[in-house]
Amino acid sequence: MLIVPEKEIAALMTRDAAFEAVKGVFASMSARTASNFPVIREAIGHADALYGFKSGFDKAALNLGLKSGGYWPGNAEKGLTNHQSTIFLFDADTGQCRAVVGGNLLTALRTAAAAAVSVDCLARQESEVLGIVGAGHQAAFQLRAVAEQRDFKRVVAWNRSPEKLDSLRKVAEELGLGFESVSLEDLGAQSDVIVTITSSFDAILKDGQIRAGTHLACMGTDTKGKQEIAAELAGKARLFTDEIAQSVSIGEFQHPVAAGLIQQADITELGAVINGTSVGRSSDEEITIFDGTGVGLQDLAVASAVVDLAVEQGIAQVVDF
């Protein structure tokens, strides 16, 4: 069995590699050569933690496995990342455990890559202003990945605690982009692309705040009850997601479906756009929304790529098991 520790991931996985791995997963899912298994996500009744499993099998890539982990809100006070996860890969032919891989950085990279793929597929080519809602651990990863997909000139951002936006400001300056902390109204009025990355249970962006032609990548809703945008927005936009069943059960589109504003048939898999079996944006005036719920196959794809690189570079630890 191979072990790739968390401390080795940063030197192995790049944003480009994560982008290609996640894009390939979207395509495989839509082609029905890969499938995710039902998600388990529960409050464990200790340390206010949410814990769960995401798993699946990609028949084409022979990636079989699961990611185990969740969210421990008190970890920051201990000098640890609140999100903790580990990825387990299994041999598809024998069921033996092939590898154990640190999943914290990989989760951040694959989540950012999913948003970036959606921008690549759906945002207007002339998009210049990138809006970011949220300033948590994941926000900087989103900014770096999405900024590479269009010739953005500046970034506008909002967070409940504006002082926490300083980290995003530093990243924007690093990328040569102007940066401004703005109100939600100004963010919606100025942005060509908006990424929401929060853990909110109440809609942050309201109906009427988003201008025509905007692409939204909603990346924070991954649990029943969470919500980042008003349900009414979905009724006025073209809708895309990673996996429809997950989107309407624990993702952003659970709310407009429950309210009767949309049906599952109104949602398109992003993989179908990548494969050319469905159209993406059809006009410059259209609002497009991507609901990135996060699927286990993404974790398996980036973990498998890391294992291959770790073996090539002699970094992977080999243990009898």
Image (spheres, helix red, strand yellow):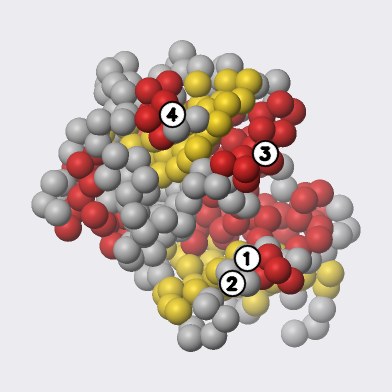
Q: Are marks 1 and 4 in contact (CB under 8 Å)?
A: no
Q: Residue at x 77, y 51 (%)?
A: 10
Q: Residue at x 63, y 79 (%)?
A: 96
Of labels 3 and 1, earlier in sequence is 1
As displayed, is residue 216 above or below residue 105?
Answer: above
Quarter location, residue 287? top left
Task: Report x, y in % for residue 271.
Answer: 39, 42
Foreground disc of the pair 2, 3: 3
Dot 3 falls on a residue whose secondary structure is: helix
Residue topped by disc 2: 72
Quarter location, residue 204? top left
As displayed, is residue 126 above or below residue 42?
Answer: above
Of labels 2 and 3, earlier in sequence is 2
Of labels 4 and 3, earlier in sequence is 3
Real-space Cα distance between discs 1 and 2? Answer: 5 Å
As drawn, the label of residue 82 is 1
Dot 4 falls on a residue whose secondary structure is: helix
Q: State the residue lying farthest toward the left.
A: 260
Task: Report x, y in % for residue 194.
Answer: 44, 33
Dot 1 falls on a residue whose secondary structure is: loop
Report the side of 38 relative to 267 (left or right).
Answer: right
Residue topped by disc 4: 187
Residue kind at label 1, given as amino acid type:
Asn
Q: Residues within 10 Å of mark 4 (few under 14, many from 20)?
A: many
